[in-house]
Amino acid sequence: MSKDQALISYILRLADNALILSQRMIESVAAEPELEEELANANFALDFIGQARLFYTCAGELEGSGRSEDDFAFMRDEHEFRNLLLLEQPNGHFGDALLRQFLFESFYVHLLEALTHCSHDGLAGVAARALKEVKYHCRHSSQWLIRLGDGTQLSHDRVQASLDDAWRFTGEMFEADDIDKAVQEGFDGPDLSAIHDLWMRDVEKTVSEATLRLPAGQWMAGGGKQGRHSEHLGPLLAEMQYLQRSFPGATW
């Protein structure tokens, strides 16, 4: 794989992460505990959709084969998506969805920060724009985690169970494969081991403030970055891609 091919694959991973997470978030609109939270969730989902569009457009321009953002989003099969396993997991209850947001966004904010310094101007520009949004998202999810963890005994126990369940998906974020290494070496991309240290520092601080405990010694799931997904991605894509698959090339 050439350096440029690795960059395209890397950008598609970023786009897939944003798209799949946005779809999960949209599913929970009108099911949040407060009206204000429903509005926040919808706006955050739109932020991620906007990021996905920018990353897909960037990848399409680099690829040069004429594929559009819609082609990437709606005309690829399950094994062609490279999103993290964490992001395709079902919403569950509010605590489950919150832990997914918190664990990913605590990682994503440091990843985007590193990408703003990469040597590819297009990717650095999209990362800088996304970073402003994700910093706010991350503060929001951290505040909710503290509110629930340090709240009632019921909210504490339920969000602790959510943390215990989601933790096994966090290892994949820091597993550097050939694509990660190629972008790091060829484009001054992120060092995932350094990001892990920053992420762990932030997570430990917030989890402690929420009077929760981090799970220890869990087996870590992986494979999403290589196209090996859980049983949950297929149904999500089937619903998301239905219109384009049923009427290829249709326009409004």
Image (tube, rainbow, N blue to C red):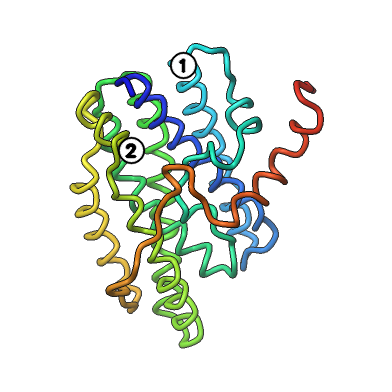
Q: Position of residue 97 (x, y in %)?
A: 53, 62
The C terminus appears in which quarter of the rendering?
top right
Q: Is residue 73 positioned above or below 169 on the image?
A: above
Q: Is residue 50 visible?
A: yes
Q: Residue at x 53, y 36 (%)?
A: 80
Q: Residue at label 2?
A: 112
In the rendered structure, which disc, 2 or 1, sits on the residue that comes first in sequence? Answer: 1
The N terminus appears in which quarter of the rendering?
top left
Q: Is residue 173 positioned above or below 55 on the image?
A: below
Give the label, 2 or 1, closer to the camera: 1
Q: Secondary structure at mark 1?
A: helix
Crowding around mark 1 (Cα neighbors within 10 Å: few <14, some 14 to 19, many 20+) is some
Q: Position of residue 175 (x, y in %)?
A: 29, 49
Q: Residue at x 32, y 18 (%)?
A: 121
Q: Is residue 32 left or right of residue 7?
A: right
Q: Residue at x 27, y 44 (%)?
A: 176
State the image quarter where residue 67 is shown.
Answer: top right
Q: Amino acid at mark 1?
A: Glu
Q: Position of residue 46 (x, y in %)?
A: 58, 40
State the image quarter where residue 237 is shown.
Answer: top right
Q: Secondary structure at mark 2?
A: helix
Q: Residue at label 1?
A: 63
Q: Is residue 48 visible?
A: no
Q: Amino acid at mark 2?
A: Leu
Q: Nearer the viewer, residue 100 or 30?
A: 100
Q: CA distance from mark 2 to mark 1?
A: 22 Å
Q: Position of residue 118 (x, y in %)?
A: 25, 26
Q: Residue at x 41, y 59 (%)?
A: 102
Q: Nearer the viewer, residue 65 or 37?
A: 65
Crowding around mark 2 (Cα neighbors within 10 Å: few <14, some 14 to 19, many 20+) is many
Residue extending farthest bottom:
153
Q: Is residue 203 left or right of residue 149?
A: left
